Amino acid sequence: MNAIYHLTFKGSQLLEEARIREYTELLQSPWSLIWRNVLGGTARGIGIAIGFTFFAATIIYILQILGALNLPIIGDYIADIVRIVQRQLELNTY
């Protein structure tokens, strides 16, 4: 009987560590689950937008520096890319 008690006690501790109770409570309230998913998705979307903006700005900055070096073939290609990007930024879409 003592062995069964220890096994069930250890099993309940493992379930508690896995937060099964909180998960089942979350499943019982669908609006809470939806709200958490909306907030999580919004945070991920904002993070991706900010990260991509910094990444693109860094790439454009590096391309401008490489274009200023006047490298024979690469410089012309980079200058074309920078001109295209600058034209797109100057366009008024509204």
Image: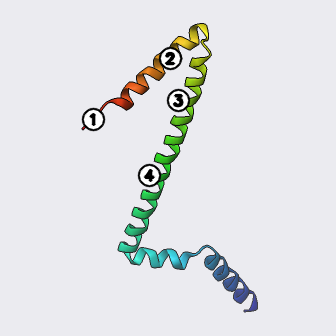
Residue in the image at 38% along x and 77% along y = 29
Tell me the tag on residue 60.
Answer: 3
Where's residue 63, x and y in %?
A: 56, 24
Please give left or right for residue 80 compared with residue 61 in the image.
left
Q: Amino acid at mark 2?
A: Ala
Displayed quadrant of residue 31:
bottom left
Q: CA distance from mark 2 to mark 4?
A: 31 Å
**Dot 1, crowdedness within 10 Å: few (<14), some or many (≥20)?**
few
x then y, percent, for residue 84: 41, 22
Q: Which kind of residue does numbered mark 3 sit on?
A: Ile
* Label 2 close to label 4 by CB (< 8 Å): no
The numbered dot on residue 93 is 1
Q: Earlier in the sequence, mark 2 or mark 3?
A: 3
In three-dimensional space, the C-alpha distance between marks 2 and 1, rounded to whole angstroms, equals 24 Å
Residue nearer the viewer, 38 or 11: 38
Which label was assigned to residue 79? 2
The answer to whether the residues at label 2 and label 1 have Cβ atoms under 8 Å apart is: no
Query: What whole-number distance in Å separates the C-alpha atoms at marks 2 and 3?
Result: 10 Å
Inter-mark Cα distance, 1 to 4: 23 Å
* Disc 4: which residue: 45
Q: Is residue 14 left or right of residue 67?
A: right
Q: Residue furthest top?
A: 72
Splitting the image into 4 quarters, where does residue 19 fall?
bottom right
